[in-house]
Image: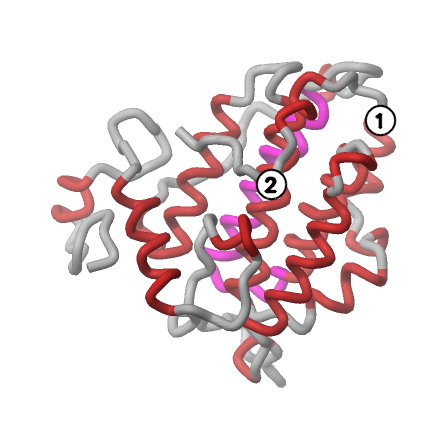
Amino acid sequence: MLQRPAYVPEWISTAPMTFRFNNEISLALDNPGNIPEWLGDPLWRVNYKGKAALGLACIEWVAWRLAGLTDVTDLLSRLEAAWASMVALPYSKNLDYDGVSNDVMNRGNPDGPRQDALIRVQDLNFVFKKGRHQMSMEAGKCAALGLHMLPPDADFEPWLRRALDALAKNCPAGEVDQPKGKVKVIDHSAQRPVPREWFEALSTPVDDAADRAAWDRFLRGLEPSANPYLVPADTLLAEGFTGPLYRMD
């Protein structure tokens, strides 16, 4: 199970739910037209896998924000599987969330924003696995949810701005990220996946050896038997997976 990153303040998990949340707000946060310009423009300068990683990191902020208010075990399990799929798509199962309910969209109910976070993970992972063009939109919506929910003194926005700047330097968008004409699928297979651990320091320039070591630590720490969204090693082998299983080397 994922552990809270050092850059996420521990106190936010028990902070009162002072932000407003209802169905109308949820719909507004799901509208890509409401992504702030200062956020949307820098996202275009980041490549596909960089955008995807940022989106997951933002939803982790949201998960830890809600951790003391409601059960986020399922959300953290889905996030863990989505992170694993950044290295190899077959590592994660389908992350579709089937429990959507309007009943949780009432004042002061943390299960409303938790539901939105689950939907964000579902949508981002689906777009990532299919190589759809909407990754800037999905990552932007993940960040927008965090901006709405995180207390100002948690410093989420300053962290987000620093992350965008560092990602633009380490993972600049190229032609593959902005295809022309009738190209329907973005092939991001050659792009370097951004480790979850990298968001701790937001270091530049790229350190390939450090990133591989970070991913190897993450993968070795996974327990498919304890996470229903991770694919077991024997299943991966039976399905023809080649290469080291839950390892970088």
Task: In the rendered view, tell whether residue 228 sits above or below residue 160.
Answer: above
Q: Which residues are drawn in magenta? A: 111-135
Image location of residue 228, percent across then percent down: 34, 28
Horizontal side of 55 relative to 32 (left or right) equals left
Q: Is residue 40 above or below residue 215?
A: below
- Pointer 2 and pointer 1: residues touching (CB < 8 Å)? no
Determine the residue positioned at 17% across, 55% down. 244
In 3D space, how far apart are the residues under numbered discs 2 and 1 (Cα atoms)?
21 Å
Bin the neighbour count of mark 2 within 10 Å (Cα to Cα): few under 14, some 14-19, many 20 and up. some
Which of the 4 quarters of the picture holds residue 171? bottom right
Amino acid type, mark 2 = Tyr
Check disc 2 and report its element: helix, strand or loop: loop
Q: Earlier in the sequence, mark 2 or mark 1?
A: 2
| Residue 235, image x, y percentages | 18, 41
Q: Secondary structure at mark 1?
A: loop
- Where residue 106 sits, quadrant-wise, is top right
Q: Position of residue 55 (x, y in %)?
A: 60, 50
Q: Which residue type carries mark 1?
A: Phe
Residue at 32% over, 37% down: 230
Picture layout, residue 234 above or below residue 55? above
Q: Looking at the figure, which quarter contains the C terminus?
A: bottom left
Q: Nearer the viewer, residue 117 or 218?
A: 218
Name the colour scheme. Answer: secondary structure
Assess whether residue 158 is covered by the magenta stretch: no
Q: Pinpoint residue 67: horizontal percent, then vertical percent.
A: 60, 21
Viewer-nearest of discs 2 and 1: 2
Quadrant showing the N terminus: top left
Say whether residue 39 is left or right of residue 232. right
> Residue at point 12% right, 46% down?
238
Instruction: Read off the residue under disc 1.
Output: 19
Label number found at residue 7: 2
